[in-house]
Image: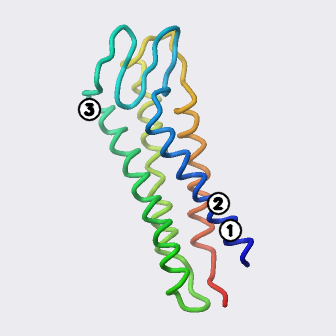
């Protein structure tokens, strides 16, 4: 049981780290001499993000980090307060709500041609956001299925 709990915690922390890195690092799109992320577009000169859709992506990514952090905190709280045989529904719900990352990545995928040059490609932060999505989904489903044992 201890190994299972350790694995679940490591999975959750991995998803959380990927969310942090993908939100902070400026490599959502890269090209020759230019980078773009959720906060600044540095194609010819660095311009702060001010359009509505990019601010929606920013908000969704930040919400996904907040809900994932809350989910990890709730897991530790429920681990010590939940009765034997109880399920971690609240923790799983918060982790599944953290799937805002998928909505943010979809919006960025659809709208990024307006934000960056056509020859630019998606960078590793964008890919990390997409990798964080299935990790958060798997983690949330494991929390919902998991029962507390003595």
Q: Looking at the image, is mark 1 or mark 3 nearer the viewer?
A: 1
How packed is label 3: few (under 14 Cα within 10 Å), some, or many (20 or more)?
few
Res. 140 image quadrant: bottom right
Q: Please, what secondary structure does the residue beneath circle 3 have? A: helix
How packed is label 1: few (under 14 Cα within 10 Å), some, or many (20 or more)?
few
Residue at 61 percent across and 89 percent down: it is 85
> Cα distance, mark 2 to mark 3?
35 Å
> Cα distance, mark 1 to mark 3?
40 Å
**Is 72 displayed left or right of 44 in the figure?**
right
Label 2 close to label 1 by CB (< 8 Å): yes
Residue 10: give its label: 2
Q: Which x, y percent locates residue 63?
A: 37, 51
Please state which of residues 129 and 144 is positioned toward the viewer in this rendering.
129
Q: Which x, y percent locates residue 28?
A: 48, 27
Q: Is residue 32 above or below residue 65?
A: above
> Cα distance, mark 2 to mark 1?
6 Å
Residue 6: give its label: 1
Residue at 63 percent across and 81 percent down: it is 147
Q: Earlier in the sequence, mark 1 or mark 3?
A: 1
């Amino acid at each position: 049981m201890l190994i299972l709990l350790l694995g679940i915690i490591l999975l959750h922390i991995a998803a959380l780290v990927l969310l942090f890195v993908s939100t902070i690092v400026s490599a959502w799109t890269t090209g020759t001499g230019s980078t773009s992320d959720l906060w600044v577009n540095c194609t010819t000169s660095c311009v702060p993000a001010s359009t509505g859709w990019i601010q929606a992506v920013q908000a969704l990514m930040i919400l996904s980090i907040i809900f994932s952090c809350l989910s990890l905190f709730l897991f530790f709280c429920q681990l010590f307060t939940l009765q034997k045989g109880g399920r971690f529904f609240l923790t799983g719900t918060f982790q599944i709500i953290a799937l805002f990352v998928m909505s943010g990545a979809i919006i960025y995928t659809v709208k990024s041609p307006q934000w960056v040059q056509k020859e630019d490609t998606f960078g590793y932060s964008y890919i990390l956001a997409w990798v964080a999505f299935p990790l958060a989904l798997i983690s949330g489903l494991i929390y919902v299925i998991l029962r507390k044992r003595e």
